[in-house]
Image (cartoon, grey):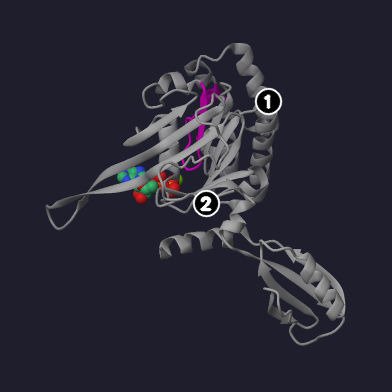
Amino acid sequence: MRAVTDSASGTDGAAGEGGTGVEDFIELDGVEKVFDVRRKVGFLRRERHQVRAVDSISFRVPRGEMVGYIGPNGAGKSTTIKMLTGILTPSAGRLRVAGVDPSRERTRLAQRIGVVFGQRTTLWWDLPLIDSYRLMHRMYRVPDARFRENLDRCVELLDLGELLDVPVRQLSLGQRMRGDIAAALLHDPEVLYLDEPTIGLDVISKAKVRGFLRDLNAERGTTVLLTTHDLTDIEQLCRRVMVIDHGRLLYDGALTGLHEVGESERTLVVDLEREVPPIELPGTRARTVRTQGPRQWLAFPATESAAPLVARIAAEYPLVDLSVREPDIEAVIAKMYADRSAV
Ligand SMILES: Nc1ncnc2c1ncn2[C@@H]1O[C@H](COP(=O)(O)OP(=O)(O)O)[C@@H](O)[C@H]1O
Ligand SMILES: [Mg+2]
C-alpha cells in the first residue's frame, strides 16, 4: 500500500520484492515510450512534436498474480500492453516478460502470452468462430489434444457452443468478446493481457467474463494483467491495482490502500427514532453532511475507526439503526487525479 513517488527507481523495497527474483514474471524498470508525431499546421507546414505515452514506469508482477491496470483515456495503458506483447519497442528502460525482451523475441514469446484488445478483434470477421480457432491451432502449432481440451473448456465456460458456426461479424459485442478471450487462450499462455475486455458489454456478459477470468487465474495460475476503466472489474477480480495517468504510475498496491491515498471518507448512515437537529460530535472528525427526516448521513475519514463514533451516537441520540458506507472507489480515483494535476 503506497503511492508511487516521482523517483524512477520505483522499487525501494516497499513492494516487498527482493530484486529480480525468478518469481517476477513481468518486469519493467524505467520504461518509456515516446511517439514522434507530425501535426499539420497551416497549409503545407508540419510540426513535429513528441508524445510521452509511457513515462518512466517500473513495476513487477509475480507469476500467477491478477493485477488491475487502470487510468483515464490516453493514460498509456494500451501502449504499455503493446510493449509487453512486443508490438511496440520501449524508447528507454528495461522490460522483460518471462525473462525475455518481448520486442526482440516476439515470435518466441507469442507462444507464451495471450492478448485481448477489447476494441479490436483477432478473429477473422467473415469466418465462423470455429474456423478462426482452427487457424490459430495451426498458427500457434498447438498439439491436437491440448487444443481440443482448451477449446472444450472455453466453449463450456464461456458459453460458446451455439456460436461456433456463426460468422464473427454476426456476433454481438459480448459474444465476440467471449470468442476473443477463448482465442487468446487456446495455446495455453502463461500470461493473459486484457485491454478493456468488458468495454461496451452488458451486465450478464460482464459477469460471465469476470467469472471466467477468476477461475482461469485460480485454477490454472495464469498471470493476468487487466486494463479497464470499469472499477467493478477491479473490485471483483484484483487485490492489487496500478493506477496510471499521463504515462506515470500514480499508485501500485492493494485496492483497499487506494482509499488511504485518496484521503477518502466513509459515511455513517444513521436512522433515528425521530427527526432531530443535525448530529454533532465535538472532538471527532465526523460531520453531518445530509439529513432527511429521521435519517442522517455523517462523513468521517476512511482511515479512522467507526466504532467510537457509533458508541457516541448510540449514547447521545435515539438510535434505531446504523450502517457504514465505504467510499466510492471512483470518487477516490477521481480525487487522486485531481490532486495530481493540482501539483
Ligand atoms: N501510435 C501512436 N502514435 C502517436 N501517439 C500515440 C500512439 N499510440 C498512442 N499514442 C498516444 O499516447 C498516449 C497514450 O495512449 P494509450 O496508450 O492508447 O492510452 P490508453 O490506452 O490509456 O487510453 C495518448 O496521448 C495517445 O494519443
Ligand atoms: Mg487503451
Q: Which residues are magenta?
A: 112-133
Q: Residue 50: x percent and y percent?
A: 26, 47
Q: Tag 1: Cα neighbours inside 10 Å, few (<14), some, or many (≥20)?
A: some
Q: Is residue 284 left or right of residue 131?
A: right
Q: Secondary structure at mark 1?
A: helix
In the figure, 62 relative to 139: above or below?
below
- Left or right of 283 on screen, residue 270: right
Residue 17 screen position, x and y as percent: 56, 34
Q: Residue furthest bottom?
A: 277
Mark 2 vs mark 1, foreground winner is 2
**Can you tell me which quadrant of the image ligand 2 is in?**
top left
Q: Is residue 128 visible?
A: no
Q: Which residue is mark 1?
A: 153
Indicate yes or no whether the magenta region holds residue 120.
yes
Front residue of this view, candidates 38 and 253: 253
Q: Is residue 209 above or below residue 86?
A: below
Residue lying at 41% horizontally and 63% vertically, measured from the top left: 343
Q: Pick whichever, 137 or 230, lies toward us.
A: 230
Give the residue type at disc 1.
Answer: Arg
Q: Disc 2 marks which residue?
A: 3
Total labels drawn: 2
| Amino acid beneath label 2 | Ala
Q: Answer above or below: position of 146 versus 41.
A: above
